[in-house]
Image (cartoon, grey):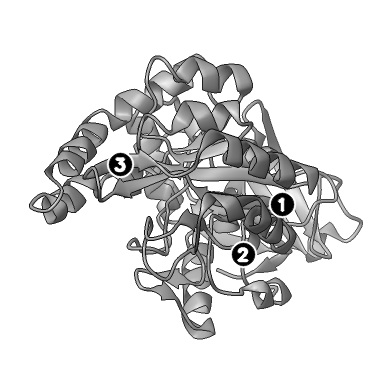
Amino acid sequence: MLHLKGRVLVGPDDVRDELWVIDGRVTFERPALARDARTVTGWVLPGLVDAHCHVGLDAHGPVDAATSEKQALTDRDAGTLLIRDAGSPSDTRWIDDRPDLPRIIRAGRHIARTRRYIRNYAHEIEPADLVAYVAQEARRGDGWVKLVGDWIDRSTGDLAACWPPGEVAAAIAEAHRLGARVTAHCFAEESLAPLVEAGIDCIEHATGLTEDTIPLFAERQVAIVPTLVNIATFPQLAAGGETKFPRWADHMRRLHARRYDTVRAAYDAGVPIFAGTDAGGSLPHGLVADEVAELMKAGLPVEAALSATTWGAREWLGRPGLTEGASADLVVYETDPRVDVRVLAAPRLVVLRGRVVG
């Protein structure tokens, strides 16, 4: 039994003085044997969410179970207790049987055009096969499918959309019929409107948002996961590819230069925004606190930045927070994260499924 005292941040407008963890569940009712509980004081948040993460993947492709375990443990120790795995070629369902590892919502394996994505990551297919592969990954995933919406086109030397509008609309409709939502990796401008008009549910990165497309996202409430800690690498990527693809390199630098303005404009327009790190490709795991800090640099108020990795993110993904009877997945901090979000990087206590795990 745990007794958590101090400030329990149940929601942005719901702050309580204490909660109890009994038999792995949250309760706000004082138990009969309260004196037997271990008491911890601090600021309590629901377990953090990384809404764009890759467990079972590194820069070269799938990794073994030991490496996947290390990735998941790194996220857990950073307070991330719920992961939306935005594409992985590895089968990580064994993690579901480990009570000490974060909960994962999987999107199956990436679906990309032939030779239009990172080698060893995705199913690489042509448009005629898109509906069939989306149906396959919808059945394999946990309610999500991940498309690669745009990538560099070697024939033009710049970013370009990967899918014709008709095929992608049919594929998204099939995913919805099977009960799955669809998200897409998108850096460029031109890929966005056709995907939104086709009914997509979310866009990853979304660096190509403009004053023309932001209202469309807001109207249809298409979420974005900006992954600003990943967008920070654009200048390095541009430098590495500039000799061969100068147009692409210039485009990537321009997208990077306006990244904060893009995210702030989307927030101001009412576009749902959630925190994701893109860990597991070229980035290490455990960066969710850095991403929240980046969202604040982009101009999100502290409550919105926290919601992007806690209350709002859990509601978006259909998972409970600190509600009566819910699984006790929570993080305790020494100081108030609403005052300084940097405290998210140093949890005092991590509780997963009612057990202290970090």
What amino acid is at disc 3? Leu
Foreground: 148 or 29? 148
Image position, residue 140 (x, y; %): 70, 64
Q: Residue furthest left?
A: 243
Q: Earlier in the sequence, mark 2 or mark 3?
A: 2
Image position, residue 335 (x, y; %): 47, 44
Q: CA distance from mark 3 to mark 1?
A: 28 Å
Residue at horizontal 30%, vertical 47%?
A: 153
Which residue matches tag 2? 102
Residue 213 lies, with reference to residue 135, above or below; the image says above
Quadrant for the C terminus, please: bottom right
Disc 3 vs disc 1: which is toward the camera? Answer: 3
Q: Secondary structure at mark 3?
A: strand
Q: Residue furthest right?
A: 32
Q: Residues within 10 Å of mark 1 (few under 14, many from 20)?
A: many
Disc 2 vs disc 3: which is toward the camera? Answer: 3
Q: Please say whether residue 270 is visible from this viewpoint.
A: no
Image position, residue 261 (x, y; %): 31, 23
Q: Is residue 182 left or right of residue 299?
A: right
Image position, residue 7 (x, y; %): 62, 40
The image quadrant of residue 28 is top right
Which residue matches tag 3? 159
Which residue matches tag 1? 143
